Amino acid sequence: MAKEPQTPMDDELARHEHEAEGAEQAAEKVAEERLMEGELEGLINDEEPLEGNVDNPEAEMLAAQVGELEQSLADAKDQALRAAAEAQNVRRRAEQEAEKARKFALEKFVKELLPVVDSLEKALETMEEGASEVHREGVSMTLKMQLDVLNKFGVESIEPHGEPFDPQVHEAMTMVPNPDLDPNTVMDVMQKGYLLNGRLVRPAMVVVSQKAN
């Protein structure tokens, strides 16, 4: 089949198509070059934070959270130490109160028993010489047994005859001038005092000397 002769119009269309193809290829080449340049700039920008960018909001937020957690941990440790110390103090006070209650639980009983001891001592002192030896020995043994029981439970007597007057454990009933003794010396004990495990249960009633005129 014979090829149809091209007209000037066909030549013009072919020329335009060739130019369009060339322009399209040039545009694609420019676009590729720009894309490569953009990727390179992106890589450069991505590397900048690795070199030490300090203006990182996420890192600053994490650092702040770490600081808050460390402070919370320190506060919790401090509170735990305070609670442990307070618990130890409470336990120590409870032990002290229990020990005190154990030591002085008999205080009221001892106070009630002391007049019995006083009566036995008075009876022994005032017995007439005509009293039988058996009677004297019975009262003396009863008094001794009573005092032994008191001593067993931490009771001790205060007999300050000849000692300096001590208002902490003595009660002065009267003061008498006495040139033979230093002033404020216990001349006579009218009633013995008693201690329970070191605590005063009853002061000693005494007569105290004073300077002679």
Image (tube, rainbow, N blue to C red):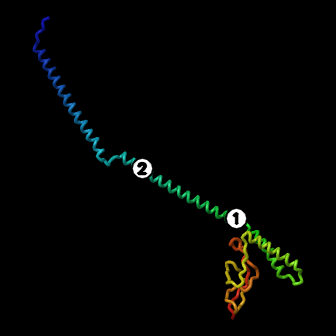
Q: In this view, does 113 lie above or below 30?
A: below
Task: Identify the image quadrant of the N terminus.
Answer: top left
Q: Viewed as shown, does residue 83 lie left or right of 31? A: right
Residue 102 image label: 1
Is residue 174 at least partly visible in the picture?
A: no
Is residue 64 at least partly visible in the picture?
A: yes
Q: In which quarter of the image is residue 50?
A: top left
Q: Which of marks 2 and 1 is in front?
A: 1
Residue 66 image label: 2
| Residue at x 68%, y 91% (from the top left corner) | 211
Query: How many angstroms separate mark 2 from mark 1 (CA)?
Result: 53 Å
Task: Identify the image quadrant of the C terminus.
Answer: bottom right
Q: Viewed as shown, does residue 60 lie left or right of 72? A: left
> Which kind of residue does numbered mark 2 sit on?
Val
Q: Quadrant of residue 25?
A: top left
Within-10-Å neighbours for mark 2: few <14, some 14–19, many 20+: few
